[in-house]
Image (cartoon, rainbow, N blue to C red):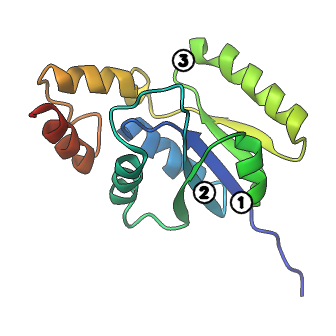
Amino acid sequence: MSSKKSKIAIYPGTFDPVTNGHLDIVLRAIEIFDKVYVSIGINPAKTPLFTVDERLELLNRSLQGVDRVETSTYSGLLVAHALEKGAVAVIRGLRALSDFEYEFQLALMNRKLAEDISTVFLMPHEKYTYVNSSLIRNLAMLGQDVSDFVPSPVQDALRQKFSK
């Protein structure tokens, strides 16, 4: 009997909030990997709209029914988290060419820190290429409909957050 090692990937991000573009990347990743951890990075230098617990809850609700996906949180080095989870790859989404230079630098540094972990760049569907969490937060704050860009649990949470 051969024991095939599971191919595990980490998809890191702030996910403040999770968007349909993020979910599209997750669905693409599970076609390639046996398991994907969608991991919220805790960065004390950032002031997110949603708490870590709220973001974790929104991710879990948005990913409900998607097999082979788990959520997690981490602080510190991404590669340390990836090694802890037994990952062979880090998933990074590229929306536009402008994302590439920064992502390329991160990928090279991660390779230097943990050469056995590859970075895999995935592009979301073209209808999500201009969507990002900052834009969604701004639209929601201004009372605009964001239903085309985020899953319904996120839409509800944004409406609740900005109706206070």
**Circle 1 — which element?**
loop
Looking at the picture, which amino acid does disc 3 mark? Ala
**Residue shown at the point (60%, 14%) measured from the top left:** 97
Residue 36 numbered tag: 2
Q: Nearer the viewer, mark 2 or mark 3?
A: 2
**Circle 3 — which element?**
loop
Res. 131 visible in picture:
no
**Foreground pick, 5 / 37:** 37
Marks 2 and 3 in Cβ contact (< 8 Å): no
Please state the horizontal and vertical placement of residue 123, each as a whole percent of the image. 55, 32
Looking at the picture, which amino acid does disc 2 mark? Val
Q: Nearer the viewer, mark 3 or mark 1?
A: 1
| Residue 25 in the image: above or below residue 107 | below
How far separated are the C-alphas under marks 3 and 1?
29 Å
List the residue tagged with mark 3.
96
Residue 31 occupies which quadrant of the picture?
bottom right
Horizontal side of residue 159 vs 50, given as left or right: left
- Which quadrant would the C terminus be assigned to in this image? top left
Residue 85 numbered tag: 1
Q: Residue furthest front?
A: 44
Label 3: few (<14), some (14–19) or many (≥20) C-alpha neighbours in 10 Å? few
**Foreground pick, 116 / 164:** 164
- Which quadrant would the N terminus be assigned to in this image? bottom right
**Residue shown at the point (21%, 31%) measured from the top left:** 146
Looking at the picture, which amino acid does disc 1 mark? Lys
Residue 108 occupies which quadrant of the picture?
top right
Q: Nearer the viewer, mark 1 or mark 2?
A: 1
Marks 1 and 2 in Cβ contact (< 8 Å): no
How far separated are the C-alphas under marks 1 and 2?
10 Å
Res. 132 visible in picture:
yes
Of mark 3 and mark 1, the one earlier in the sequence is 1
